[in-house]
Image (spheres, helix red, strand yellow):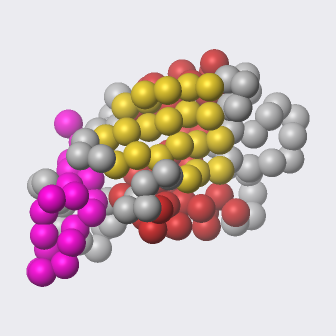
Amino acid sequence: MDFQQLADVAEKWCSNTPFELIATEETERRMDFYADPGVSFYVLCPDNGCGDNFHVWSESEDCLPFLQLAQDYISSCGKKTLQEVLEKVFKSFRPETKPKCLGALACSYSGEACRGLPEAM
């Protein structure tokens, strides 16, 4: 899939989540995503015909621990689509074991910091 098609998939995914696709870099095949307040990550997309997987990372140390689930998923057996990777990232930031978060990074849950994302609009 060419990079523009991947960017279109990412834009469609963003329309159903609090995330925005804030930057794309075709040369690096990189897409940067952001959601208020301060939740960010990027995806590096594999080249066409290459055996590489997607790669997710964040330059925010607060966000990195939440990406571990998505990173494990990407490295597991089988090829993944960008849609599948983005869904796993979204679930990583919104753990299903806690109640739905109302305030993202600023809220608290039983005395511990809740760093999940709020409900999608």
In depth, the one of 63 and 96 nearer the eye is 63
Above or below residue 72? Residue 41 is: above
Residue positioned 26% across, 53% down in the render:
117
Per the rendered image, the range of residues in magenta is 104-121
Q: Residue furthest top?
A: 4
Residue 113 magenta = yes
Tally the numbered discs.
0
**Image coordinates for residue 31, horizontal then vertical, percent:** 56, 33
Residue positioned 30% across, 47% down in the render:
38
**Image coordinates for residue 21, horizontal then vertical, percent:** 44, 29
Q: Which quadrant of the figure has residue 106? A: bottom left
Left/right placement of residue 18 relative to residue 23 reads left
Image quadrant in which the C terminus is located? top left
Residue 72 magenta = no
Residue positioned 13% across, 54% down in the render:
103
Above or below residue 93? Residue 112 is: below
In depth, the one of 11 and 32 nearer the eye is 32
Left/right placement of residue 52 relative to residue 32 reads right
**Image coordinates for residue 104, horizontal then vertical, percent:** 20, 55
Above or below residue 68? Residue 87 is: above
Image quadrant in which the N terminus is located? top right
Residue 50 at least partly seen? yes
Most common secondary structure along the magenta stretch: loop
Residue positioned 13% across, 70% down in the render:
108
**Image coordinates for residue 34, horizontal then vertical, percent:** 37, 39
Residue 87 at least partly seen? no
Left/right placement of residue 62 relative to residue 49 reads left
